[in-house]
Amino acid sequence: MGSLFSPKMPSLPPVQPLPPAPSAELSQEEKDRIAAEQAERERRRKGRKSTILTSPLGVEEEAEVQKKTLLGG
C-alpha cells in the first residue's frame, strides 16, 4: 500500500555531449616551464642526497672526521 501513495520519480536530464579532447601538442612555453620545474626538483633532490655519506652497502668514501681539541686549538 506504500507504493500507492509514493511520489513518482522525475525523468532523468538529457545526457550532455563530451567536451572536445585537449590537444596533445605542448607549446614551447609549456615545455620550458615543465623543464624548469623538473630541474628544480632534481636540484633539491641532489642537495639533500649529497649530505648523506652512507649507502645500503656502508660508507662509500672515507668520511672527513675532525676531533675536537681543548680550547679550539
Image (spheres, helix red, strand yellow):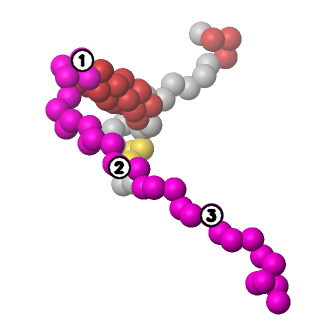
Left or right: 55, with 13 as reference point: left
Q: Residue 54 lies in magenta, yes or no?
A: no
Quadrant location of the C terminus? top right
The percent position of residue 3, horizontal first and vertical second, equals 76, 84
- Which amino acid does the dot numbered 2 rest on? Pro
Residues marked 3 and 2 touching at CB (< 8 Å): no
Report how far apart the C-alphas of labels 3 and 1 lie in the structure: 49 Å
Q: Residue furthest bottom?
A: 1
Q: Nearer the viewer, residue 3 or 71?
A: 3
Q: Which residue is mark 2?
A: 17
Left or right: 20, with 65 as reference point: left
Q: Callout 3 environment at 10 Å: few (<14), some (14 to 19), or many (20+)?
A: few
Q: Residue 1: name its quadrant.
A: bottom right
Q: Main secondary structure of the magenta part?
A: loop
Q: Earlier in the sequence, mark 3 or mark 2?
A: 3
Q: Which residue is mark 1?
A: 29
Query: Residue 63: in sight, yes or no?
Result: no
Q: Does 43 appear above or below 9?
A: above
Q: Earlier in the sequence, mark 2 or mark 1?
A: 2
- Which amino acid does the dot numbered 1 rest on? Glu
Q: Residue 59: name its quadrant.
A: top left
Q: Callout 1 environment at 10 Å: few (<14), some (14 to 19), or many (20+)?
A: few
Residues marked 2 and 1 touching at CB (< 8 Å): no
Query: Residue 69: in sight, yes or no?
Result: yes
Q: Residue 5 lies in magenta, yes or no?
A: yes
